[in-house]
Amino acid sequence: MDKPHPVELREHAVSLVAQGNTHTEAARRLCVSIKFVNDMMRLKHETGSLAPKPQGDHGRCKLTGVKGWVERRIAEQPGPMINSGRRSAMSANCSQTKSATTSSKQQDTEPIKRDAL
């Protein structure tokens, strides 16, 4: 999410409209969207303030339920959370698969002897 526009810009947009400019003219002069000017006028009318609304999830993120578990895991294993044991096991499996594949290909490409038939 982008940062909110500065309060000074918000105030300037409202003051331009209050001076008799249209929302379109105010938006053009300030290089902002017409929606921004409309939103600022609505915000000023509804709340009496032009302060930006608080941003962020405020504890409603997807991982809130597992926060304690993550903190315990980090405390147990400080440092990078890369599971090096799993990587080495995967590497070993890949090399075994490659060697098995290579040997079977070599067997398939060897010429068949007539005596074996």
Image (tube, helix red, strand yellow):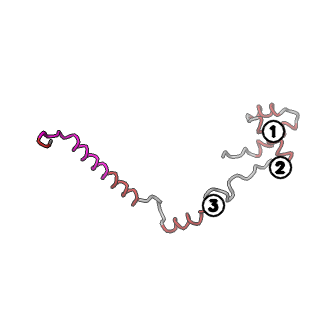
Residues 77 and 64: in front is 64
- Residue at image mark 3: 64
Quote the CA–CA distance across marks 3 and 2: 32 Å
- Residue at image mark 1: 38
Q: Which residues are magenta?
A: 95-114
Quote the CA–CA distance across marks 1 and 3: 35 Å
**Quadrant of the rendered image containing residue 106:** top left
Q: Which one is closest to the eye, mark 3 or mark 2?
A: 3
Q: Is residue 86 part of the magenta span, yes or no? A: no
Q: Amino acid at mark 3?
A: Thr
Q: Amino acid at mark 2?
A: Ser
Provide the major secondary structure of the magenta segment.
helix
Q: Residue at x 76, y 39 (%)?
A: 36
User: 114 left or right of 78?
Assistant: left
Q: Is residue 98 part of the magenta span, yes or no? A: yes
Q: Are marks 1 and 3 in contact (CB under 8 Å)?
A: no
Q: Residue at x 80, y 31 (%)?
A: 24
Q: Residues within 10 Å of mark 1 (few under 14, many from 20)?
A: some
Q: Residues within 10 Å of mark 3 (few under 14, many from 20)?
A: few
Q: Amino acid at mark 1?
A: Asn
On the image, the x and y values in percent for residue 117 come to 15, 41
Q: Are marks 3 and 2 in contact (CB under 8 Å)?
A: no
On the image, the x and y values in percent for residue 55 come to 70, 52
Indicate which disc, 3 or 2, sits on the residue closer to the N terminus: 2
Residues 116 and 45: in front is 116
Indicate which disc, 1 or 3, sits on the residue closer to the N terminus: 1
The total number of labels drawn is: 3
**Quadrant of the rendered image containing residue 113:** top left
On the image, the x and y values in percent for residue 51 come to 78, 49
- Residue at image mark 2: 49
